[in-house]
Image (cartoon, helix red, strand yellow):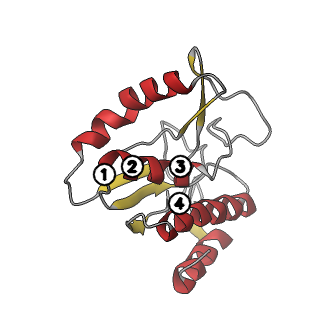
């Protein structure tokens, strides 16, 4: 499930519910009783009374133009849990398109803190997969670098980024 992690502006709560139903809840309701549901989350998007608001240009936006919102992962798993009635969750994609690996570590650490807070609140989270291992060919070009491992575009040499070792240490500790 590619979760949008919508957030309502004041007075747009009804529009939020309408859009959540169309974009997510129809599919999440169909997952009730399944073994698990996969959640993909990268950012959140505001909903106003007229609908989904585009991400305005901002220096903190990611390389794909979305808002820097590590809290979206917690929002997405909580919404998924509520709508499915408690189907276990596997985070199948979460990450950030950035050329700054320190920012990747900060984003992922914050996203994982929100994920662990959801687990501490009783949400059954079965696992977490970072998107992606490699800076891959994404959406027709090499530009949005999501990976924990850099790829030289001419030689295809792979070089681990500090975020790879950092995430490995998080996994060993069991906490960000």
Numbered disc in front, either 4 or 2: 2
**Alpha-carbon distance for marks 2 and 3?**
11 Å
Q: Which mark is residue 82?
A: 2
Q: Badge 2: how crowded within 10 Å, few (<14), some, or many (20+)?
A: some
Q: Position of residue 47 (x, y in %)?
A: 58, 26
- Location of the C terminus by quadrant is bottom right
Q: Position of residue 24 (x, y in %)?
A: 38, 36
Dot placed on the residue nearer the N-terminal end, 1 or 3: 3
As helix, strand or loop, the secondary structure at mark 1 comes to loop
**Marks 3,4: beta carbons within 8 A:** no
Q: Residue furthest bottom?
A: 172
Numbered disc in front, either 2 or 3: 2
Residue at numbered disc 3: 75
Res 35 visible: yes
Dot placed on the residue nearer the N-terminal end, 3 or 4: 3
Residue at numbered disc 4: 156
**Marks 1,3: beta carbons within 8 A:** no
As helix, strand or loop, the secondary structure at mark 4 comes to loop
**Marks 1,2: beta carbons within 8 A:** yes
Left or right, 76 with reference to 37: right
């Amino acid at each position: 499930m590619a979760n949008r992690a919508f957030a309502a502006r004041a007075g747009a709560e009804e529009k939020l519910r309408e859009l959540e139903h169309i974009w997510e809840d129809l599919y999440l309701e169909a997952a009730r009783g399944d073994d698990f549901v996969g959640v993909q989350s990268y950012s959140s998007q505001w909903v106003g009374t007229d609908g989904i608001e585009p991400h305005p240009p901002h220096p903190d936006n990611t390389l794909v133009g979305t808002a820097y919102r590590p809290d979206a992962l917690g929002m997405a798993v909580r919404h998924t849990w509520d709508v499915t009635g408690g189907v276990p969750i596997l985070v199948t994609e979460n990450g950030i398109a950035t050329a700054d690996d320190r920012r990747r570590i900060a984003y992922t650490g914050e996203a994982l803190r929100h994920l662990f807070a959801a687990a501490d609140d009783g949400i059954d989270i079965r696992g977490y997969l970072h998107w992606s291992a490699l800076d891959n060919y994404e959406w027709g070009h090499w530009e949005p670098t999501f990976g924990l491992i850099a790829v030289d575009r001419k030689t295809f040499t792979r070089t681990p980024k500090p975020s790879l070792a950092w995430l490995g240490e998080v996994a060993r500790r069991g906490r960000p």
